[in-house]
Amino acid sequence: KSKEAEIKRINKELANIRSKFKGDKALDGYSKKKYVCKLLFIFLLGHDIDFGHMEAVNLLSSNKYTEKQI
């Protein structure tokens, strides 16, 4: 509804994604795809993204086509 609310929501989501990528458990392919897609959408909204690049590269180097497709 407002720019401040959007920025607050995006920062909250970025913090959540950052914690998932740095977590102790390894993420499965679906989770990695979901979070990389969220990062891409946030980037398309015009916000700066400073992490997640290696996760995207790892998806590209995967053996599964569905992970490479992202």
Image (cartoon, rainbow, N blue to C red):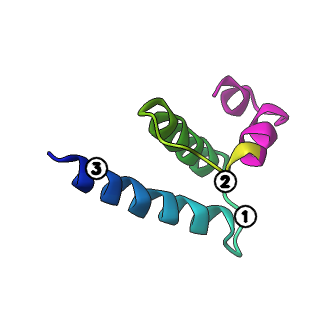
According to the picture, the residue beneath numbered tag 1 turns out to be: 26
Residue at image point 54% right, 59% down: 17
For marks 1 and 3, give the one nearer the viewer. Answer: 3
Give the Cα distance between marks 2 and 3.
29 Å
Amino acid at the residue labelled 3? Glu
Q: Earlier in the sequence, mark 2 or mark 3?
A: 3
Give the Cα distance between marks 2 and 1.
7 Å
Asked if residue 61 lies left or right of residue 35, the reply is: right
* Residue 70, image x, y percentages: 63, 28
Of the 4 image quadrants, the one containing the N terminus is top left
The main secondary structure of the magenta stretch is helix
* Residue 22, image x, y percentages: 69, 68
Contact check, label 2 and label 1, Cβ < 8 Å: yes
Contact check, label 1 and label 3, Cβ < 8 Å: no
Q: In the image, which residues are magenta?
A: 54-70
Q: How many marks?
A: 3
Q: Nearer the viewer, residue 19 or 2?
A: 2
According to the picture, the residue beneath numbered tag 2 turns out to be: 28
* Residue 38, image x, y percentages: 49, 42
Instruction: Check residue 6 in the rendering and tell me which mark sits there, or answer none.
Output: 3
